[in-house]
Amino acid sequence: MTTFELWAPVPSRVRVRAGGRDTEMTAGAGGWWRAEVPDAGPGTAYAYLLDDDEHAYPDPRAVWLPDGVHEAGRVYDHGAFDWTDGRWTGRQLAGSVLYELHVGTFTPDGTFDAAIERLDHLVELGVDIVELLPVNGFNGTYNWGYDGVAWYAVHEQYGGPDGLKRFVDACHGKGLGVALDVVYNHLGPSGNYLSKFGPYLKAGQNSWGDLVNLDGPQSNEVRRFILDNVLGWLRDFHLDALRLDAVHALADTRASHLLEEFAREVDVLSTHLGRPLALVAESDLNDPRLMAPVEAGGYGLTAAWDDDVHHALHSALTGDRSGYYGDFGALSTLATVLTEAYFHAGTYSTFRQRIHGRRVDRRNTPGHRFVVSLQNHDQIGNRATGDRLSATLSPGLLTVGAALMLTSPFTPMLFMGEEWGAGTPWQFFTSHPEPELALAVERGRKAEFAQHGWGESEVPNPQDPATFERSKLDWSELGTKPHADVLDAYRRLIALRHEISDLTDPRLDRVSVEYDEDARWLVVHRGEHAVAANLSAEPRTLPVSATTILFGDAKPGESGLELAPESVAVVRR
């Protein structure tokens, strides 16, 4: 027997189609409906009929949608999975190295099971936590995952809910934590039936779609819908962390913000489970209050993405000053973010044409609360051709960038393939089956980049299957030059980070930076250690006295540390 419960205050009549028949549901308080179906066990297909409409709609809380987001779900029993991670005690975010991957393009097969076969590579690399791009249900066979409409379901082509559990269980068996990217600020354009059940949406839009009803009439149950989803990923799928997509787009005017409720309830769950659970926000607000404790007036999240560090590294290495890179590029800017976390911290942003951000309290805010990257899915995939830094930079400069990130006081994150300077792009791809939507996405993408001088033929068509195939990693590159050398550098740098406490020290007020803007060199002081970087095309002698060279081919000289062009060294002073 299965008891079906559904929040649906909009219709006046609800039936559940399950076990070979339609069963009338009984209305209860607050818009909740309930029915018991004796012969509907695990695996039974079920869906809901609203009012007198004979079309059956999938359950908003369906965990298993094997036939897609438009079709009936299946009854799923979380207790049936045979977990083997009973001794798993978790991975705290502080001190960890993250690795962001997209299940569909991480391997040729694009499944959880195929990804399991590559976990040894991540262990040897030194990664601590694997961060999956969204895997919840969306229409079509593949896309980035940010157009999800079935927030509780796991995309069937990746392996469905059991596939995700197998992946998490395998990761834990190898000592790897697992984080999942989740999206609560909007829903995708196809397969969103929530409004037929209740007032999940409200008037207004953000950059990606209709606003979620977080603070209007009947929003209590909408918030509960999201909170239960957060807890379900962590409890039922044994995940260790969630990355919360674009929290600045969560329109919530309540005195207690939804993010604060996330933090409170996840803290309760963490206490019960006896392992650390992390919430990491993606936000472009540059507001440290996201990570401040609730009792201090903050939201209590574990960490936030820090795009300013990415922008400063990217611009310094590539010379790119377009768009939002306009305020970045100088070594002084790079020095600022390495010591202050944010560059725009109550300062003027020329891109936004206004004051932006809030200053970080360097003494009391640990650097591990800021997740930083040299590359990530957004900063690669949102380029016109999805080109990686490896398409532009020398292996030397790739290593310089990696060293500055991996020896920083922040929490570093790699994007899949970055560690070997992958030659494959990672492009924007979709598989919308609706012709009108597919054409709109194709035209929109080309029009967006036409404004920046790109010709239509130069911008990959997101709907072309070749765009998706091009974006898959080529694992055969690992054993070839220069990829093998870049991989060796990443492994050695991550090992140093884990071995030397100075390199994980999160105290921002203990970091200092020297630089020469004209000569293009930079020295980051980390306790008894220093990271010396030469970004120029000429040899440089840096004012560093080194007793031991731990990484790099630098040579101590009479007047300082001699570095080859486009190179970096980690030394003990």
Image (tube, helix red, strand yellow):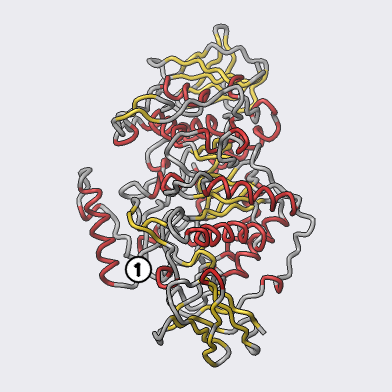
* Residue 427 horizontal/vertical position (percent): 37, 54
Res. 140 visible in picture: no
Q: Quadrant of residue 39?
A: bottom right
The residue under the point 57% across, 24% down is 569
The residue under the point 62% across, 70% down is 162
Res. 263 visible in picture: yes
Q: Nearer the viewer, residue 363 or 154?
A: 363
Q: Is residue 419 shown left or right of residue 171?
A: left
Q: Is residue 409 shown left or right of residue 468?
A: right
Q: Which residue is under mark 1?
A: 432
Quadrant (top left, top right, bottom left, bottom right) of the C terminus: top right
Quadrant (top left, top right, bottom left, bottom right) of the N terminus: bottom right
In the structure shown, which secondary structural element does the residue marked by tag 1 occupy?
Answer: loop
The residue under the point 47% across, 55% down is 184
Is 486 situated above or below 233? above
The residue under the point 57% across, 13% down is 544
Q: Nearer the viewer, residue 42 or 400?
A: 42
Q: Amino acid at mark 1?
A: His
* Residue 407 horizontal/vertical position (percent): 59, 30
Name the outermost residue toward the right.
87
Q: How many marks?
A: 1
Is 447 situated above or below 292? below
